[in-house]
Amino acid sequence: MSARRGGRHAQVGVRRQGFGAALLLWRRMLFASRWGILVWSLVMAGLLYYMVQAVRTVMGPDGLQARAQVIGLPAGAMLSGPGYGLEDYTLQAMTANELLGGFAVAVAIMSLRLAVRHTRGDEEAGRTELLRALPVGRFAPLGAAVGTGLTANLGAAVLVFLALRACGFEANGSLGFALGLLLLGSVFTGVGVLCAQLSLTARTASAWAGMLLGLAYLLRAVGDAGQRGGGVLSWASPIGWVQQQRLFVQQRVWPLWLVLGLGVLLIAAAFALQARREVGAAVFAQRAGRGRAGLLGRTLLGFGLRMERNRMLCWAAAVLVAAVLTGSLAGAVADAFAQLPQLQALLGAPGADAQLDQLVMAALAKFLAFFAMVVGVFAVQSPHRLRRDELHHRGEVVLALPVSRWWLMGHQMLLGLLGSALLLAMAGLGLGIGAGSALAAPVLGSFVAASLWYLPVVACWLALSMLALGIEARGGAALVWVLLVGCILIGTYGPLLNVPQWVMDAEPFTSIAALEIVREGASAVPAAGFTAAALLLGALALGLYRRRDLRG
């Protein structure tokens, strides 16, 4: 009797110790990610406050109502939301329609990064195996990772709520906005930890999770573009559920229950899979490779191409589909702007005498610059594999072979450049296919050629990211991301937010008139300048990488 009680008390003690270990792990993970969470949350809240105040300053009631006509078009609904309250378009309705979807994507990205980093990333680095050697329960690391993601989402939601209240918005709508972001963050926390159970590497888990996020946004965009107020496809996406609250118009709460239910289901599925697999393993076993490598696979460049192949193909497919859909909306955007001369400055074609073809080409030029920004994100991500190989001591193994330091970085730089060129060509191809019906003359070849004129700008971002790795400066990679996001925001929203002209001139993506270079023979001096800057930054990165020690 006493032995049974003693055994039972011992089990209770282990459970308490395991629960306490989960809390300690949660604190450790939160501490390790504290700066990323804080910066991400503060930037979202500050940007939301700034954008609302800028629109309030620049646009009056007439400007908002004119903007509602654009948002009511399929192109506007695709890029913003289902379009509730367009009959009396207030600043609050504009915030819910046009900003909620973008901030939902930002929260989803933060949640995915945290979830994969603290689950599959820790397992891949061997930290989880060391922790499991201690009296730590099987579910403690996963529970701590989920808790870290939910805590980060809660902090971001609180700051967003305070920013909306500081803008003078009503409490119910502001709370719905913040709760939508919180619950959507829990959904993509579940997506991240579930993908970590399925895949063997953090790279693959991040790729799968990113594809699901892109699919969710694409379903929402196509559904909203097909029908005012959202179609069937809009209800197939959790991002669409958040936007279906009809905030500040006819607010309803029940779509949030769908988001909450999906988040709970995904997290529960991750815990169920965690109970069935070993540490370091995955539900989907890794496929065995060939017994002998081919001729290309025996070289460092060929091996790197094989490692980057899936990432490049996924990005290329996503960019091509998005470009075709976006190009098909150029005619509708031009029709709307032809009726609203006061908004034609946003396309860079001011004046009431602008012809419809000119507006279509101006809209397509803006779309092409936007896709160049997307490819810039791909380029800044390119050193990630080299950085992870260095941290996991795989770089030392490669350097033990007859491989030089400069080629170790140089082959990854070359792969990033080739991948960026492929994505730019896919963007030009998709826009040309989508816009073919809106233009009388064939433009497919012109758009592919014009897209490649952005390669020097993208190469500068690639070289700058490699330079941050070569310097090994603390926070260097984060600084490059901050600069890139700042340029994207200025290039996208600068004309709307009345940004000073000298700031607009310094933004790299809008400084190259790619379509004018191809179709009208405009000056290519800016492109030549970016080419020289990319070569200089790349050479500097290679030189610095050769002179420093590898991290481990």
Image (tube, rainbow, N blue to C red):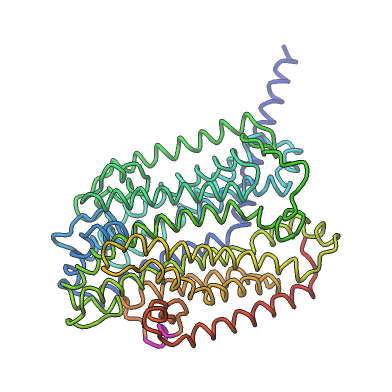
Q: Is residue 225 above or below residue 476?
A: above
Residue located 67% across and 34% down the image: 137
Q: Magenta residues, as a range?
A: 501-505
Viewer-closest of 39 and 425: 425
- 503 magenta-colored: yes
Which residue is at 45% across, 44% downward? 187
Q: How many marks?
A: 0
Q: Main secondary structure of the magenta part?
A: helix
- In the rendered image, the quadrant that contains the C terminus is bottom right
Q: In this rendering, would 343 be left or right of 512?
A: left
Which quarter of the figure has residue 308? bottom right
In the rendering, at what x and y percent does residue 256 appear? 33, 43
Whether residue 502 appears in magenta in the rendering, the answer is yes
Q: Quadrant of the N terminus?
A: top right
Residue 74 lies in quadrant: bottom left
Q: Residue at x 66, y 41 (%)?
A: 21
Indicate the position of residue 247 as horizontal and vertical percent values: 25, 53
Out of 12 and 38, give the one closest to the viewer.
Answer: 38
* Residue 106 percent location from the top left of the image: 44, 58
Q: Position of residue 389 (x, y in %)?
A: 72, 57
| Left-right relation of 502 to 147 | left
161 is higher (above) or lower (below) than 517 = above
As drawn, is 384 to the left or to the right of 154?
right
Is 292 placed above or below 363 here?
above
Q: Nearer the viewer, residue 115 or 491?
A: 491
